[in-house]
Amino acid sequence: MFNKNFIIAPLSVFSIALLIMLSFVRGAISAEELTGKEIVKRADDLMRGNSLQGRYAMTVTTPGWTRRLELDVWEKGREKTFIRILSPAKESGIGTLRIKESMWNYLPNVEKAIKIPPSMMLQPWMGSDFANDDLVKESSIVDDYDHTILAEEDMGPNNSYKIELIPKPEAAVTWGKIIYWVRKDDFVPLREEYYKENGELIKALEYSEIKKMNDRSIPTVWKMTPVKKEGCRTVIEVADVKYNLPIGDPIFTMENLKNTR
């Protein structure tokens, strides 16, 4: 009589072996893809999309005063940014435009557009703790740095990757090093630390209040704290943002920068 077990048993062993082999292959592919650069790129893509347009509030706090700005922001790709201040009234109409490596601020009170040289990219934007480069992202955290996963850390309820970003020798960047924490589950950024070339920590950016905005979940509160300026901080709150909508190129022009009507 034909012995079915003689065939079934070897096939079962073969099937199990095949499944084990495939699982190892899938694991190897995932590990290979999940480099420090890929993690940072996914976090950057999450926050920026192919384009974005949104409304934000910025509150600047010092020991002597506090002021709040409302902003409209447009970004297209990695090369174009436009920011317009809506309030308070005395600063309404001030604009910032970046196209590739060039950046301008427009001051409606004097009706003048001022080009910002590369040497000024570390200067505060509108007296805040965010530098010009922080707001318009002239340098790319994906392309201008080498990325190393240092560890996996628990940050409260969030399991995160801790990644070190060291600038490439040819990159024109403002920081000597960045340490970046990204949530493992969905690549939401949690914290950034900015260091000078000598290793001195200058400021830290904390992300919180993760909410669904448009088609994704992002942190909606960003707090920048300078290490050596006691009592100073700048908080950006995301009021509304939409991703991946068509944005016309006329937004990113000198004519629009000067048009405050």
Image (cartoon, grey):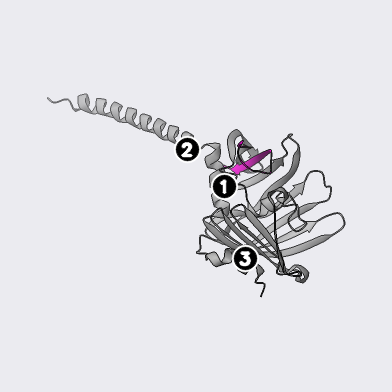
Q: Amino acid at mark 1?
A: Ala
Dot 3 or dot 1, earlier in sequence: 1
Q: Is residue 223 left or right of residue 218?
A: right
Q: Amino acid at mark 2?
A: Glu
Cα distance in 3D space between marks 3 and 1: 31 Å
Whether residue 171 is situated above or below residue 135 in the rendered picture: above
Q: Is residue 122 magenta?
A: no
Label at residue 209: none
Which residue matches tag 3? Answer: 254
* Residue 185 shows in the view: no
Marks 3, 2: nearer the viewer: 3
Q: Image quarter for residue 15?
A: top left
Dot 3 or dot 2, earlier in sequence: 2
- Magenta-tinted stretch: 165-184
- Helix, strand or loop at mark 1: helix
Q: Amino acid at mark 3?
A: Met
Cα distance in 3D space between marks 1 and 2: 14 Å
Whether residue 261 is situated above or below residue 238 in the rendered picture: below
Marks 3, 1: nearer the viewer: 3
Q: Position of residue 68 (x, y in %)?
A: 76, 63
| Rendered residue at 37%/30% (across/down) | 20
- Helix, strand or loop at mark 3: helix
Label at residue 33: 2
Q: Residues within 10 Å of mark 2 (few under 14, many from 20)?
A: few
Say which quadrant the C terminus sits in: bottom right
Whether residue 9 is situated above or below residue 173 in the rendered picture: above
Which residue matches tag 1? Answer: 43
Quick check: marks 3 and 2 in contact, CB under 8 Å? no
Dot 1 or dot 2, earlier in sequence: 2
Q: Is residue 88 left or right of residue 159?
A: right
Say which quadrant the N terminus sits in: top left
